[in-house]
Image (tube, rainbow, N blue to C red):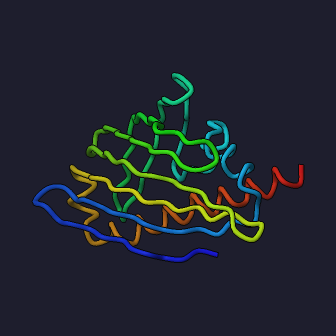
C-alpha cells in the first residue's frame, strides 16, 4: 500500500526545491527491510536511472545516475552518504550530483516501524535541481519526482519479495 502525503515544489529563477514525503506499507518483516535498505547491490538495482553504485566505505557511495524529465535527459556523477544510523529504526542520507545539464543535491530520512507483521517505511526528502534540467523540465518536475520515487519503492518491494522466497 502506498499513501501519498505531500509533494512540494518551490520555483526559483534557475533551480527547483523539492520536498517529497511518502509512507509505504511493505508486507515483509522489519529486519529484512532494514538489511535491504543498507545493501549497496540492492540499491543499485532498485534506484531508477542508476547506472552504477560503488562503495567507498560502509556509509559512502559513488553513483552514476541518469534522470529524464520531459525531453531532457541528464547524467550525474553522484555521491551518497548514509548517517545517523539507528539499526532497525531509521537513517539519514545526503546526496549530491553534478552533470553537464545541471546539479542536484538533497537529503532525507527513512524510518521503519513494524505493525501487525508488516513494515511501515516512511520517507521524507528535500532536494534541489538546477541547470537546464530544472529550466526545461519545470512543468514536469512534480510528475517526474513522484514517478521516480514510486518506481524506486516498487522495485524495492519486488526485490524484497524475491529475497523472502529465496
- In this view, the residue farthest toward the left is 13
| Along the line of sight, the residue nearer the viewer: 96 or 98 | 96
- In this view, the residue farthest toward the right is 166
**90 above or below 149?**
above
Please give the name of the residue rendered at 57% of the width and 63% of the height, measured from the top-left corner.
151
**105 above or below 3?**
above
The total of numbered circles placed on residues is 0
| Along the line of sight, the residue nearer the viewer: 89 or 14 | 89
Say which quarter of the image contains residue 117: bottom right
| Along the line of sight, the residue nearer the viewer: 146 or 31 | 31
Residue 146, position in %: x, y? 45, 68
Residue 145, position in %: x, y? 41, 64
Quick check: 141 left or right of 45?
A: left
| Along the line of sight, the residue nearer the viewer: 82 or 148 | 82
The quarter of the rendered structure image containing the N terminus is bottom right
Please give the name of the residue rendered at 73% of the width and 59% of the height, measured from the top-left corner.
158
Residue 68, position in %: x, y? 41, 57
Please give the name of the residue rendered at 53% of the width and 23% of the height, measured from the top-left corner.
57
**26 above or below 45?**
below
Quick check: 137 left or right of 117?
A: left
Please give the name of the residue rendered at 17% of the width and 65% of the height, measured from the top-left corner.
11
- In this view, the residue farthest toward the top is 56
Amino acid at each position: 500500500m502506498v499513501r501519498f502525503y505531500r509533494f512540494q515544489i518551490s520555483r526559483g529563477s534557475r533551480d527547483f526545491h523539492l520536498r517529497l514525503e511518502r509512507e509505504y506499507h511493505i508486507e515483509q518483516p522489519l529486519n529484512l527491510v532494514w538489511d535491504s535498505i543498507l545493501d549497496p547491490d540492492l540499491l543499485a538495482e532498485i534506484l531508477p536511472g542508476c547506472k552504477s553504485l560503488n562503495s567507498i566505505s560502509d556509509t559512502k557511495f559513488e553513483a552514476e545516475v541518469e534522470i529524464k524529465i520531459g525531453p531532457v535527459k541528464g547524467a550525474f556523477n553522484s555521491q551518497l552518504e548514509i548517517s545517523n544510523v539507528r539499526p532497525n529504526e531509521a537513517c539519514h542520507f545526503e546526496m549530491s550530483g553534478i552533470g553537464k545539464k545541471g546539479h542536484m543535491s538533497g537529503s532525507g530520512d527513512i524510518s521503519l516501524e513494524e505493525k501487525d507483521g508488516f513494515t511501515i517505511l516512511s520517507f521524507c526528502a528535500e532536494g534541489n535541481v538546477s541547470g537546464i534540467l530544472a529550466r526545461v523540465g519545470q512543468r514536469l518536475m512534480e510528475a517526474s519526482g513522484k514517478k521516480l520515487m514510486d518506481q524506486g519503492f516498487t522495485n524495492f518491494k519486488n526485490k524484497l519479495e524475491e529475497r523472502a522466497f529465496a
